[in-house]
Image (cartoon, rainbow, N blue to C red):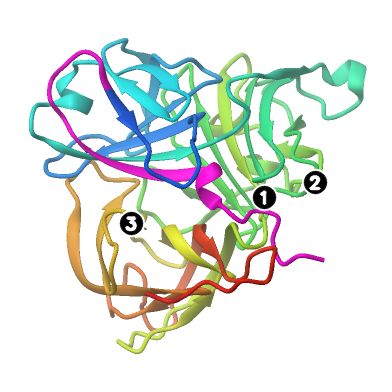
Amino acid sequence: MAYTTIDDPSAHFQTALYTGDGASSKAIVNDGNSDLQPDWLWTKQRNASQNNLLFDSSRGVTKYLKSDENEAEATNAAFISSFNSDGFTLGNSTVVNDNNDTYVAWQWKANGGSTTTNDASSTGIGTIDSVIQANTTAGFSIVTYTGTGSNGTVAHSLGVVPKFVIYKRRSAVENWGAYHTATGNTGCCFLNLDIAKSSAAAYFNNTSPTSTTLGVGSSPAFNGNGSTYVAYCFAEKQGYSKFGSYIGNGNANGSFVYTGFKPAWVMTKRTDAANQWPISDNARNPFNVVDISSYANLASDANTVSNHYDSVSNGFKLRGTSTGWNASGGTYIYMAFAEHPFVSSKGVPTTAR
């Protein structure tokens, strides 16, 4: 069996850097090996304080959410005007396209905006109806559903068990809930908050994801009666994505985290104490040591931090002593996507930086 089925991760995930010009039709074209039409787009201004803005092709290109706030979904046609065959087109809003300001855009491919509806009572999959677009090759699906207020399950269409799921109530103010395989079905971290892991049966009804469904409890963050939700679901794919945990050592010769690929994007979160959600990528950091992060839960501009980690051919090696990612004895979860698999399907190894 081949090591990976994804030789070119850029077919499913890419990072774009751009400088705004204030024009109403500025096209951002990706520069990866493959064209990528984004279905989930996450933008962040780099040189000034501005919200993390999240868009997707299931909810519609004009609708956005802020990962650093608990606000309900909002609409603005001046932010993003289209998802294109290889990138996206900006509007003229100063939030995403201010003249001479710099931005980063992370993009994931689902199914080109094409969705299917799961009628739970007809299919027998789950107990709550959902609308899904899935990329089973890359292990990513976008799921929208209306809550019932009672314990239930929601179909995700990945065919394998998701290891990481981000939930957001769209129709009302509510924190972003996150399920991670390492924190389990009673533990939850909130993407817009810096707090440690919180535990409650109402989050996931003590029910882990299966190969067909997500478990949701009665918490309004996941399943309020009559409220609308979006869930971004990720399953691991060898050589492309990894969702795990590590223990920090508080040393500049830090822990090594094996992913099975050279990382293109890494987000971490300390779970045993309060701390942020730092995000690093290979576009802003093409060389080691990786030292630039923004934060999923903060609107502040990108922070330069000394000696965050080294990106290597099969994972990342922590180099800093910050409690944000390497406190002695600290417990962390991570989410990572590949620049290149450690070994291609043809047995060709990648190289370190």
Q: Which amino acid does label 1 sit on?
A: Ala
- Disc 3: which residue: 276
x%, y% of residue 35?
Answer: 49, 36
Q: Is residue 205 above or below residue 342?
A: above
x%, y% of residue 345?
Answer: 69, 63
Q: Which of marks 1 and 2 is nearer the N terminus?
A: 2
Q: Which amino acid does label 2 sit on?
A: Thr
- Disc 2: which residue: 210
Q: Which of 114 and 242 is in front in this view?
A: 114
Separation of marks 2 and 3 at Cα, in angstroms: 29 Å
Q: Earlier in the sequence, mark 3 or mark 1?
A: 1
x%, y% of residue 245?
Answer: 55, 69
Residue 281 is marked as: none
Q: Cβ–Cβ below 8 Å for labels 1 and 2?
A: no
Is residue 73 visible to the viewer in this orientation of the structure?
no
Q: Is residue 115 above or below residue 29?
A: above
Residue 235 is marked as: 1
